[in-house]
Every structure is written in structure tokens, then in C-alpha cells.
Amino acid sequence: LGKEIALEFSQKNYIVYCTSRKEEPLGGQGIRFLKMDITSDEDVKSVIGHIMATEGRIDVIVNNAGITLSGPTFGFSVEDFKGILDTNAIGSFRILKEALSYPEKPKKVINITSLNGFFSFPNFGIYSASKFAAEGLGLALRYELGPEIQVVNVAPGALLAESEKKDASPNS
């Protein structure tokens, strides 16, 4: 999903900064890659600082980082739960807190949440809890930051990776 969003913004002539813990540069005009761990205060501060120093502003923030853990809720450790919360909810908070510390504020924030932020199913307890948190944060910020900064939550359902699409086609 992140790759598709980046390519779409790039095609609309936005300068796009993609971040990931791994080196995964995308092709595309105007797309720049920076290595960043969303669970690290230092990484987020450094990357946001670099973008602000280079570009002078960030127009749109898309909070798309996320991990999924599925299985019986009590089959996970407290550390697993903290880890998924840190990526799926706290990471977005960390990014926004840093970006909003600059005088030039973004005009739009798009949070990619999940339908699991509205409904919880067996074996998705800690994932759903993390997405409920992300959904709640976005809803609160919509009121706290608006109308100067538009905050939008987008809650997609299950997505298939490109490799899974081939396997799921009716002709396979």
C-alpha cells in the first residue's frame, strides 16, 4: 500500500520521502528514500529534521507504517503487544509530534488505520487494539488540529501482497 501511495503522489509531482527500517528504495520521479525506524525517537527526529532542512516544509504526512500479528491473544508476550503498539499507533504520534514542532506545519495528515480498528476478530486481539488506538488518535487530532491541518483516517480491509494476488486469481 505504501508503495502505491508513494507512486501516486510522485505522479502528481509531489516530492515524496519514503521511510523504512530496511533499505527499499522505490523507483519514481521525485521519490527519495530515507532509512528510519518509526519506533525510535532519535531516528524520527533526525529524518524529520533532514526533510525540513532540505525542503523547508512537509505538506502531507501519510502514516502508513504497520505490522500485523495474529494468533491467540494470550499467545503473545507483553513485549509483542508493546512492539505492535509502538509501530502501529505510537509511531504515528512520534512522527506528528516531531513534524508539528516546526513553525511550518503540514496541511494534511493521512493515517492508514484498518477495519480492525472498528471490529475485532478472534486471533487479532493485539493487532485490533493497536488499530483502535491509531483510529482514536486520528479522530482526536481531527478536532485538535483542524481546520488548519486536515486529518483523515483511511481504514482499508485486508490487502493482498502482489505475490498473493497471483495466487488468489481465479485462473490459478
Image (cartoon, helix red, strand yellow):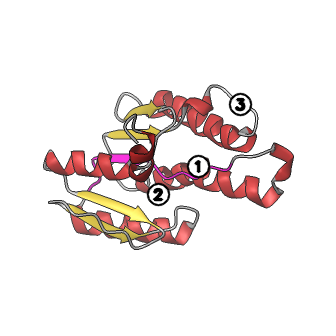
Choose the circle earlier in sequence order: 1 or 3.
1
Callout 2–callout 3 Cβ contact below 8 Å: no
Callout 2–callout 1 Cβ contact below 8 Å: no
Q: CA distance from mark 1 to mark 3?
A: 18 Å
Residue placed at 40% from the left, 44% from the top?
165
Residue placed at 41% from the left, 31% from the top?
152
Mark 1 highlights which residue? 88
What span is in magenta? Answer: 57-69
Residue 42's place in the image compared with 70, above or below, is below
User: Disc 1 residue type?
Assistant: Asn
Q: CA distance from mark 2 to mark 3?
A: 33 Å
Choose the circle earlier in sequence order: 2 or 1.
1
User: Disc 2 residue type?
Assistant: Glu
Magenta run includes residue 80: no
Point out residue 45 in the picture as x, y percentages from the top left corner: 47, 67
Dot 3: within a 10 Å radius of its alpha carbon, few (fewer than 14), some, or many (20 or more) residues? few
Mark 3 highlights which residue? 121
Point out residue 139 in the picture as x, y percentages from the top left corner: 53, 29
Mark 2 highlights which residue? 98
Q: Secondary structure at mark 3?
A: loop
Residue placed at 59% from the left, 55% from the top?
87
Total labels: the figure holds: 3
Q: Secondary structure at mark 2?
A: helix
